[in-house]
Image (cartoon, rainbow, N blue to C red):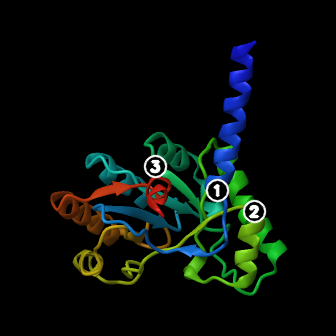
Amino acid sequence: MNIVKNMVFLGLMFMLITKVYATSTGEPIRQIKTTQKVVALTFDDGPEMPYTDKILDVLEKHNVKATFFVLGGNAKANPDLIKKIMVKGHDLGNHTMTHTMMKNKSVEVMKKDIQAVDDILRAQGYQKEITFRAPFGITSDNLKKALQELNKRMVLFTFLPQDWTKISAEQIYNNVMKEMKPGLIITLHDGGKRRDNTVKATEMLIETLQKQGYEFLTVSEILKLQP
């Protein structure tokens, strides 16, 4: 009888902790205030072959965990990549179904779009919290309200290294390094167009930052450091 009571109590505590953990004001998180040498490496707009796969290989080579903010359409079209991301221990995030700007949409339309991506990821077996990243990093009062109603946290980025442009891997690397500090949320892209330079820059960044004593955390891990 005591065992049953304990199990019920633990279950209720888990639900309470989960609810508190996911509570959102709708305000974007752009970086984490910490003195620890930690950063979050994130990738947007995938998953897509071959670049998501190449990035996963780089991450595995250096024993680094990252977070992939995926488009719902791409996630649905590439279930094997979603499975590989999960199996390798990375986080998944929600980047809308098709990367359309959310700013002028109604709360209900936004909620439907965001929920559709969550449903795809849940159907593919993802069980952790799914944070949200707005396309182009553009927020609005309606979006904040939609996220509040969905009890979903929005994680944006500290800055953008411009890796979607035609700059070299060295330029992408330099753009990140000149902004480097503890708690940074680095945002690169594994989907969209050619991402060869992003793949190269990812490895360059990992090698340098690991030598400097930085640890790479997933979004779910680094959010635990948020005061």
Instruction: Say above or below: 141 vs 95.
Output: below
The quarter of the rendered structure image containing the N terminus is top right
Task: Write the residue at 66% across / 31% down.
Answer: 10
- Circle 2/circle 1 CB separation < 8 Å: no
- Is residue 19 in view from this perspective? yes
Report the residue that reaches farthest toward the front: 2
Give the camera-side residue of 186 and 184. Answer: 184
Question: Which dot, 3 or 1, sits closer to the camera?
Answer: 1
The kind of residue on which mark 1 rests is: Ala
Residue wearing tag 2:
150
Residue 12 drawn at (x, y percent): 72, 36
Q: Point out which mark residue 90 bears.
A: 3
Marks 2 and 1, the one that precedes in the sequence: 1
The kind of residue on which mark 3 rests is: His
Q: Point out which mark residue 22 bears.
A: 1
- Is residue 190 in view from this perspective? no
Instruction: Say above or below: 127 vs 93.
Output: above
SS under mark 3: loop
Q: Quadrant of residue 102?
A: bottom right
Tell me the CA gap for discs 3 and 2.
23 Å
- Circle 3/circle 1 CB separation < 8 Å: no
Task: Write the residue at 61% across / 52% down.
Answer: 129
Tell me the CA gap for discs 3 and 1.
18 Å
Q: Residues within 10 Å of mark 2 (few under 14, many from 20)?
A: some
Give the camera-side residue of 205 and 12. Answer: 12
SS under mark 1: helix
